[in-house]
Amino acid sequence: MTTSAPPTVVIPATPSSCEILVRLFLGVKPPPSLHALGRMPNCGPEATAALLKVLRDNHERSHVFFNEFSFHNHSVHHLLAIYALGAPAPVINAAYEDTHLDHLRVTFVAPNKVTITDDTFTDYLGNDHYYNAYLDYFHRVVLQPGIEQPEMLNRFLEILIHPIIHVGYGVEFGIMGLIAEGLAWTSVHPAEPEWMPKAGSRLRALNILTLMLRDPRFFGSRTLDKHEFAAMLESHGEIFVKYGELWDCQIETQEDLEARMEELIWAATLMYGVGSWDGNEAEYRADFFTAHIVTSVLFIPTICAYLSRESQRKLLRAHFLTSITWWVVRGRPSFALKDFTSRPLPPVLNAPSSKYSNTLPGTLPTPAACALSSTSPYASNANPWYAILADALVHPNEHLCKVQRALAHFNLLYGHREAGFVLESLSKDGVDVNPEYGYLDGSVFLRTAWLTAAALGWVTHGEENTGAWNYQEFQKAALEELELMKGQGRA
């Protein structure tokens, strides 16, 4: 388990000049790609002003990690996700002040007041004590683009692929300060062993998941811990490389890119959404780690809008490899799509024995007799996405809004896909296609989002935050693991 306590003597970082800060957080731009995420209307300019104010404050105030276990500062991701969902200024301010400020770690001057230059760039990679020094360096880079540095793709995807989410937000909203933060974040992550494969054979991503489910060399269905990700690469890296080489990730045209992106999105949704489901009567696990596959793949189209075809291919393949590794780490759950898609969709009533109801908790308003479909459940909940996104806007967990925003976007892109749509293309690969894929359709995004909302608690309808995904629980587990390792002489 990697830990990193702050230096013995902490010197607060020197604030950026007003000129630099304004240039880094100049405003909010529209998405760079038609396949990038859309945004909901908000309540006027006050929301944008509040957003930029808290982003600047976080940039100047806070370190990228908020504890010694390299837990990430998620405030920016939370704030931008709810802003994109239409949050007004008071909700943006409350999200920052009530959810994040109490545990963020102050950013500090690097040891010996080191300044990162082109010549010293590689000297401190992987050491988070130098985060602020790298941040200052990348201030210069993003305001004068064109510098490339080694191993950035590997580092870009390290530790739950958070840096790709951070840079993705910066690119999506056109905020250079966030790109600088994400690149500095990337610099202070450890680089794992080189395991980027070369382009290989021609299999679709879903067929590769099928082969991996049948592969006896993995750990059965055992779920591993976060810190075992690196160990997985050490012990099984060659296997992952071989699977990566099987993926058809050639990108020569925009149509190729869109096809590969769709493969990644379906794979990500299966690994998290269906992989977290153990049946209608069981608690939905809403796996925290595979959820990051969903929230990170969301930004691939945004980043790819600025990349060459070769760089697009490298980024997509790296993301796919990181995703399948985390999926195996989390137990390599299978995809019971026939049962998963057989449930009625919300708001139609489901079986009383189901763990989660397809109707919202509490007393719902009674529609007027003149309302369309007034005697059906659709009159009070015609589009379940409205309830899902409204709940995510004010839910205190900073991850829920990111997951729901991603799933809503995927639904917009692929919600029209009918059951069986993928079978023809999968059958061309020459492998036995998983028959469960015959039940894959565009409803999986709504089904996953509804279960996720129910598992975390419908706070807009009187339910408490269940505590799932709360950082305190992960920190408690990390402390217990550290004490255990100390007792065993391994830390």
Image (cartoon, rainbow, N blue to C red):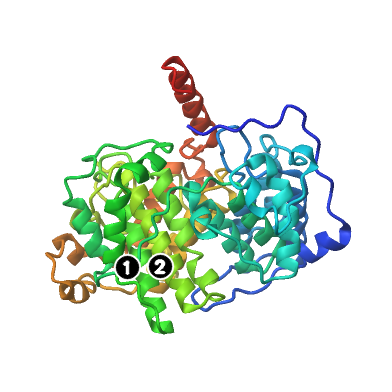
Residue 421: image quadrant is: bottom left
**Residue indicated by mark 2:** 411
Which kind of residue does numbered mark 2 sit on?
Asn
Q: Is residue 225 left or right of residue 68?
A: left
The answer to whether any part of residue 51 appears in the image is: no
Q: Is residue 425 left or right of residue 254?
A: left
In the rendered structure, which disc, 1 or 2, sits on the residue that comes first in sequence? 2
Tell whether label 2 touches label 1 (CB within 8 Å): yes
Q: Name the foreground residue: 480 vs 277.
A: 480
- Local crowd at mark 2 within 10 Å, few (<14), some, or many (≥20)? some
Q: Is residue 360 left or right of residue 221?
A: right
Q: Residue at x 43, y 83 (%)?
A: 254
Q: Is residue 413 above or below residue 157?
A: below
Secondary structure beneath label 1: loop
Secondary structure beneath label 2: helix
Q: Position of residue 111 (x, y in %)?
A: 75, 38
Q: Name the foreground residue: 289 vs 443.
A: 289
Which kind of residue does numbered mark 1 sit on?
Gly
Q: Residue furthest top?
A: 487
Q: Is residue 140 left or right of residue 40?
A: right
* Numbered tag placed on residue 147 in the rendering: none
Q: Position of residue 19 (x, y in %)?
A: 87, 63
Q: Residue furthest front?
A: 119
Q: Residue at x 20, y 45 (%)?
A: 217
**Residue indicated by mark 1:** 442
- Local crowd at mark 1 within 10 Å, few (<14), some, or many (≥20)? many
Q: Disc 1 and disc 2: Cα gap in Å?
A: 7 Å
